[in-house]
Image (cartoon, helix red, strand yellow):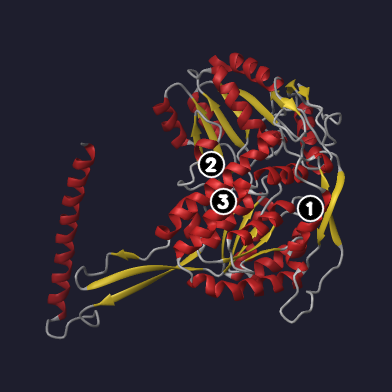
Amino acid sequence: MSSTDTPTAVGDAPTLAARRLDGLTDRAARARPADDGDGPSGDPDAIDVFAPATDERIGSVPACGADDVAAAVERARAAQEAWAETPAAERARIVERFGELVADRREELLDVLQVETGKSRRTAVEELFDVPTGCSYVASEAPDALAEERRRGVAPGITTATVTREPVGVVGVISPWNYPLTLSMGDAIPALAAGNAVVLKPDEKTPYGALLCSELLELAGLPDDLFQVVTGEGPEIGPPLIDAVDYVAFTGSTAVGRTIAERAGRNLIGCSLELGGNNPLVVCADADVDEVARGAVQACFSNAGQLCLSAERIYVVESAYQEFLDAFVRETEALTLGVGYDYDADLGSLVDADQLARVESHVEDARERGATVETGGRARPDVAPYCYEPTVLTGVDPDATVACEETFGPVAAVTPVPDAAAAVDAANNSPYGLNASVWTADRERGAELAREIDCGTVNVNDAFLATWGANDAPMGGFGDSGLGRRHGREGIQRYTETRTVGVSRVGPLTFPDRIPTDWFVRGAFGAMRVGRRMRRGVDAVRRRLSRR
């Protein structure tokens, strides 16, 4: 496993300087005065932000408190009323423009992402594809997704039913550190397009990307105060944020997600939660093992494994096991480690000492239970303080931590199974159900197996982009992996409430005065019977036409 020698200090970034980061802190909600001219109250302490690549302090952001959150939500709520009345097409144009600005400013954003996350530039650029393409989709789809719909009334020709969608109001977004642009803007942009205001709480480790996006949204034409960023510790400002908003979107751990869901439930507000995963990858006997090995490297080690969609459990049909394992180890050992501002390195750093300790603990637990480290299995402080080699384990005890819990690091456990059915059973032996992949030469068989795996997204002959990149298709988890869906129309409409308006053309719908009630009841049930027969006939014709 090789490493690059590219410089890593903040000053080495092509477009970035420490003073630029300090300037972004002015965009935190706390830095803005309230309407009466008095600054929001709260803890005056700042939160230091460190570069994982060097463990150097790169700046600080305000440690907002509950009062700061309340003030931010109040400003957002006041601005949202006019925004809700703005035509959806006009809101969409601002969203589209924001996506264009993200693409135009990609070099600066890439530098910010690398500085605050420690990820490689190859990984960071994924976010610069995600955000503009997501904005384009939302801009094109939102006007139709939010449009008034005509539905069948209770009595066709006599009544009508119309459904309108109204924004929920103020949406709270709580985003993680691993993909600070994708997972913050991916929730915020559809919420804004749906007519809501957004108060975003980025992870305190990675606040600068969100603050820069605040600047770009302003340049795109978003009205003042519709997008607020509150920086601070989760336990301090998460609860008051949930208590103040009308909907909360969270990406993070299952444990924290449960707490958020409980609080949202008490407040009777909606929530969507994308949570943890211990994702399986299935290799069938007929798969091209060299192709699968390349795909498995992407599936397991993208962003040094700090990816909610990352594969951590690999199940290989026995007849292909050794050949796959050899190819997978070979591809893993060819990966390069580094934290420079170029595209030379495949993997960057873990985010901090806690994440490194978690990875080391999981690997050591597997070793103590009899697992073999086929490659990797050690930290690389010569590359970066929190760098860890991509690691392949075999012989992992089913009760080992790495087999049961999310490691969120560059660690994959490879296990032989008798056949594809056993692989599916093993894949489903988990409380998580976020993402999976199936690899086979028979795509139709692969799709059949995919439908048997209890995950919200399942990819055939791909790691995760076939589903994640499909902006028109919903994405989310089963079981302990979360609630709700992002992407697709569902990802826009989750930020709305529906209102159904029913209109009767004949006055009150009640028992008629001029007909005996028993006659009316018999006639009504007879009409229902005729209606069912007619619908069955229409459905049969549609099925025949669809086969042509």
Give the residue pinned by disc 2.
Answer: 468
> In the image, is 412 to the left or to the right of 361?
left
Residue situated furthest bottom in the rendering: 513
Residue 105: image location, x then y, percent: 65, 47
Q: Which mark is residue 20?
A: 1
User: What's the CA distance linking mark 3 and mark 2?
Assistant: 18 Å
Mark 1 falls on what kind of element? helix
- For residue 347, which quarter of the picture? top right
Tell me if residue 213 comes above or below residue 15 in the rendering. Answer: below
Residue 339: image location, x then y, percent: 77, 34
Give the residue pinned by disc 3.
Answer: 99
- Classify mark 2: residues with Cα within 10 Å, few (<14), some (14-19) or many (20+): many
Residue 192 in sight in this render? yes
Q: Which residue lies at the image location 56% right of the left edge and 47% below the top edge?
A: 132
Which residue type carries mark 1?
A: Arg
- What is the quadrant of the N terminus in the image? top right
Q: Earlier in the sequence, mark 1 or mark 2?
A: 1
Mark 2 falls on what kind of element? helix
